[in-house]
């Protein structure tokens, strides 16, 4: 019963394309921009090798923003695929 319900809800597989990659990059940039203004201690230790290159982020802030960016990107890509855009 559950298997047939899951198969009925399945969609066509998502094929990678440059548009998918650009969407993920844009979502990560958006997440880093959002994190720059909302993280209370963005330069917490351990520091990254070139702080000015990473926007003054420490390792925890950089990992947190890029993880959020990937979650956001996966949601946007799957949502656009569901709408038929990808």
Image (tube, grey):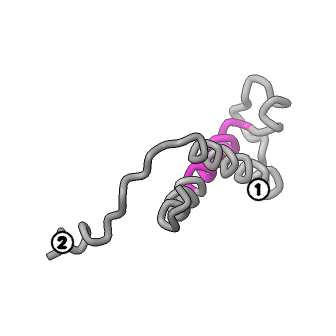
Front position in the image: 24 or 52? 24
Up the image or down, 37 lies above or below 29; here it is below
Q: Secondary structure at mark 2?
A: helix
Closer mark to the observer between disc 2 and disc 1: 2
Q: Which residue is mark 2?
A: 4
Tally of marks? 2
Crowding at mark 1 (Cα within 10 Å: few <14, some 14-19, many 20+): few
**With 35 as the anchor, is 2 left or right in this view?**
left
Residue farthest to the top? 49
On the picture, is 41 further left or further right than 61? right
Residue 40 % position (x, y): 78, 54
Residue 61 colored magenta?
Answer: yes
Residue displayed at 65% across by 44% down: 22
Residues drawn in magenta: 58-71
Quadrant in which the N terminus appears: bottom left
Residue at position x 73%, y 31% in the image: 47
């Amino acid at each position: 019963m559950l298997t047939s319900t899951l198969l009925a809800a399945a969609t066509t597989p998502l094929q990678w394309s440059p548009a998918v990659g650009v969407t993920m990059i844009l979502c990560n940039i958006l997440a880093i921009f959002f994190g720059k203004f909302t993280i209370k201690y963005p330069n917490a230790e351990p520091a990254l090798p070139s702080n000015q290159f990473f926007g003054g982020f420490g390792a925890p802030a950089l990992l947190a923003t890029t993880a959020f960016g990937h979650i956001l990107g996966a949601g946007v890509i799957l949502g656009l695929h569901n709408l038929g855009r990808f």
